[in-house]
Amino acid sequence: MAAVGLPAVSDPFATWLRAVALGGQGRYAAARAELARVLRQRPDPVLSSLAASTTGSLLRQLGWHAAASGWDGRAAAMVLPGLLAVSPESGATSPDRVDAACDALTGLAADALGLGRLDLAARLLERVRALLGDDETVRVRARIRLCWVRAETALAGGDAVRALSHAEAGSRLAETTLSARHRIKSALLVAAATAAAGDHGRAAELAEAVGERAAEHGLLPLRWATAMLGSGVAATPEDRTCAAAEANSYEQMILHLGGRFRPAGTC
């Protein structure tokens, strides 16, 4: 997979954006290298925090929640002490300290969720909600991420109705953005919550559409996640077997690009 549309960059902010895009494509080794370059340049606390939390996100995507929590904790420590000095609205052209803090805390919540600590995840998400306030027209990216982890937490707690509500809220917000990845991941969570609510037929239809969109935009990790969902909700055993084989092929591609999934039973 080529890093289509990703020119070489030099300044730390553009390097971080490139790393985010590479991660979305599943180019984990390349993304980690770019993030390490950002951190070596010792930029301001906001960008350093974003680079650390993005490193955590890449680990978490592959199942390494305990390792991710170290990076997310580091990211939070970089920006939380100075929160009282910032404006309630994010900057027009780049993230600010609140945006970075929301990324770090949302990441920590997702890490806690992956480690089975649902109560801690809920408390951390409440801190994010308090930072964001009630105006849904500002800090939309952070609000979408909050909806994702709220939905995942509800799913882990067996509350499919609440999970679907949060997933749909995230999807509505994502449709107001230019980010294809945010729109597609939000749609994937709607499909997963629909499956948890018992409507496997509808979930399979949604997953198929999500998979097509993820393929169109070269989002390999989302193609893998969608195939994994499809292997559980497809209408026939043959379709489930096909989806499982598809997920395995994507996993091998991710491995080739530097992404190592956490083996079951390890931390």
Image (cartoon, helix red, strand yellow):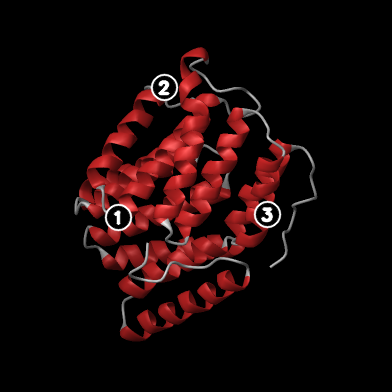
Residue occupying image coordinates x 54% and y 25%: 97
User: Would you say 34 lies left or right of 229 here?
Assistant: right
Residue 113 spot, x, y in % from top left: 31, 50
Query: 262 or 199, which is in the foreground?
Result: 262
**How many numbered discs, if any?**
3
Per the rendering, the mark at residue 33 is 3
Q: CA distance from mark 2 to mark 3?
A: 36 Å
Q: Quadrant of the C terminus?
A: bottom left
The residue lying furthest to the left in this view is 158
Please identify the quarter of the rendering in which residue 60 is found: bottom left
Residue 115 spot, x, y in % from top left: 31, 54
Residue occupying image coordinates x 72% and y 40%: 14
Residue 213 spot, x, y in % from top left: 54, 60
* Disc 1 residue crowd, few under 14, some 14–19, many 20+, Cα 10 Å: many
Residue occupying image coordinates x 47% and y 33%: 76
Identify the residue under disc 1.
193
Query: 206 or 73, which is in the foreground?
Result: 73
Identify the residue under disc 2.
135
Query: 178 or 201, which is in the foreground?
Result: 178
Q: Is residue 217 visible?
A: no
Which element is circle 1 on?
helix
Indicate which disc, 2 or 1, sits on the residue closer to the N terminus. Answer: 2
* Disc 3 residue crowd, few under 14, some 14–19, many 20+, Cα 10 Å: few
User: Would you say 219 lies left or right of 189 here?
Assistant: right
> Disc 1 residue type?
Ala
Indicate which disc, 2 or 3, sits on the residue closer to the N terminus. Answer: 3
Q: CA distance from mark 2 to mark 1?
A: 25 Å
Which element is circle 3 on?
helix
> Disc 2 residue type?
Asp
User: Would you say 133 lies left or right of 120 here?
Assistant: right
Q: Disc 1 or disc 3, which is closer to the eye?
A: 3
Residue 20 spot, x, y in % from top left: 61, 48
